[in-house]
Each structure stands twice: as structure tokens, then as C-alpha cells.
Image (spheres, rainbow, N blue to C red):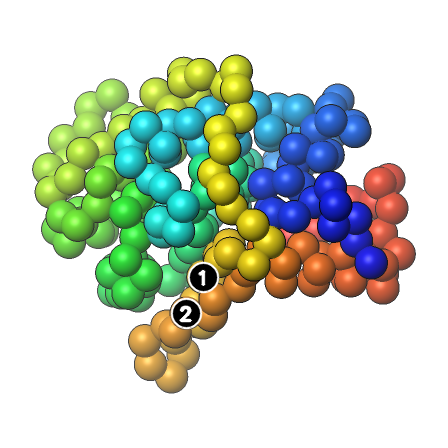
Amino acid sequence: MYPEKIIRTVGDLIIHAAGKSPDKPAVLYKNDALTYAQVYEQSLRLARRLIRLGVGKGDRVCFYLEKRLEKVVSIFGISIAGGIFVPINRLAWAGQALHIIKNSEATVLITTFSRLASLKESLSGLLVVIVIDRPDDDTLAISCPVMSWEEVMDGNACAQPSSGVIANDVAAILYTSGSTGLPKGVVLNHLNIIAGAYAVSEYLKISTEDRILS
């Protein structure tokens, strides 16, 4: 069994790892890398910003990103804030992405400027869009506030918020590819994700020295 007394939520995973191996590389992307401590610090900054924006326990936060370091930070940051993370497949077309945003009743979207351009006309229900790579000459006119990732990372990371989330609370909604219709959401709680990750790790005998290609 996994150490359930220590790790009860997805957010606990990075908190535990950062405490145990703070300077060890956690995630690599091209020529960039983040240690466990850096992932935790950035996740905490995102969590505190989301809470200040009004995101609370059970609120859905979508992210529509290609593979990049901010994707990992988003998962943990949303979880620490008490929210439910809703990944949108990076290959999804705009119509599918909009369906997921609306169907999941998301309150916040994290995305890139280029992806936002294809969604801008239908985002009026969101509290805010957080844009990873917002350019200086931003000319998009959209129906909700926009905040840059840099603004989010400028926030306070001093204290961990208390979300009141427990293992049986919903952690994520994962949507199908929508190959035969509109994507459909599958609900997973924190226990589902942690136990699944631990089972795969045990079966494949993954050690702290291994690197996993994603």
C-alpha cells in the first residue's frame, strides 16, 4: 500500500517530494528543468493566486496546453488550492475545447496566447484566463479578464493554504478524445489517482533514478 497517512491528495504528492528531495530534478522539458522544490514553490504561487481569484474547493480549472513545464505546475497548483483540474487534450480542436470548458463548468482557463485566439469569443463564463506566453502587443478582445503567468508567479508562496480537501474528494475530470462524438468526462478522486500511480510504480519497479518519457 502507498503511505496514505502522508499522502492523501494530489497536492500532497509534490509537498512530500519537495520535502524529501528538494534539489532533485522533478520534470525536464527540452533544455529546461524544475526541481521538486521549484515545482512546489510555483504550484503554491498558482494555488494562492487561484484562491484570491475566487477558486475554492470543488471548482473546476481547465488547462489547454502543449507539453510544457507549466502543465505540471498547473496540476499541483489547482490541487493545492482545492480545485478540480480538467486537462484539455493538446490535440483537441477549438470546438472540443470549448465544449469541455462549458461542460465541466470551469471557472478558470490556463492556456497559451495562440490557443486563446481560437477560443476568445466564447469565454464569458470564466472568472479569468491565465495566459502562459502573453505577448506585449496583445490585441485580443475577449469577454473575460486575462492575466499573465508572470503575474501569477509574482504572488506570495510563503504559506500553504488549507483547502479542506480529503482523499475521496474529486481531483480531476478527464475527458475522452471525442472520436465518436463530443468528449465525455470521467471523474477521478484523489485516492484513484494516487493509488493508480503507486500501483504502476510498484509494477514497473520505478525508482528515484528512473526517467519517464511522457
Q: Give the class, few, some or many, for how many residues have Cα within 10 Å of label 1's Cα (few <14, many ≥20).
A: many
User: Residue at 36% across / 41% down in the picture?
Assistant: 56
Q: Quadrant of the N terminus?
A: bottom right
Residue nearest the observer in this picture, 17 or 95: 17
Mark 2 lies on a secondary structure that is: strand
User: Residue at 56% across / 50% down in the picture?
Assistant: 166
Residue nearest the observer in this picture, 137 or 164: 164
Name the residue type under label 2.
Answer: Gly
Could you tell me how many numbered marks the image carries?
A: 2
State the CA–CA distance, disc 1 to disc 2.
6 Å
In the picture of the structure, the residue carrying the numbered disc 2 is 185
- Compare marks 1 and 2 and give the one earlier in the sequence: 1
User: From this viewpoint, is residue 74 visible?
Assistant: no
Q: Could you say which disc has been placed on residue 124 in the image?
A: none
Where does the image place residue 191, in percent across and percent down from the top left?
63, 58
Above or below, comparing residue 49 to residue 195 in the picture = above
86 on left or right of 141: right
User: Residue at 39% across / 74% down in the picture?
Assistant: 184
Where does the image place residue 186, in percent across and percent down from the top left?
47, 70
Where does the image place residue 16, in percent across and percent down from the top left?
71, 35
Above or below, comparing residue 79 to residue 145 in the picture = below
User: Residue at 64% across / 28% down in the picture?
Assistant: 34
User: From this viewpoint, is residue 84 visible?
Assistant: yes
- Looking at the image, do the residues carrying marks 1 and 2 touch, with CB atoms under 8 Å apart? yes
Mark 1 lies on a secondary structure that is: strand
Q: Give the class, few, some or many, for how many residues have Cα within 10 Å of label 2's Cα (few <14, many ≥20).
A: some
In the picture of the structure, the residue carrying the numbered disc 1 is 173
Name the residue type under label 1.
Answer: Ile
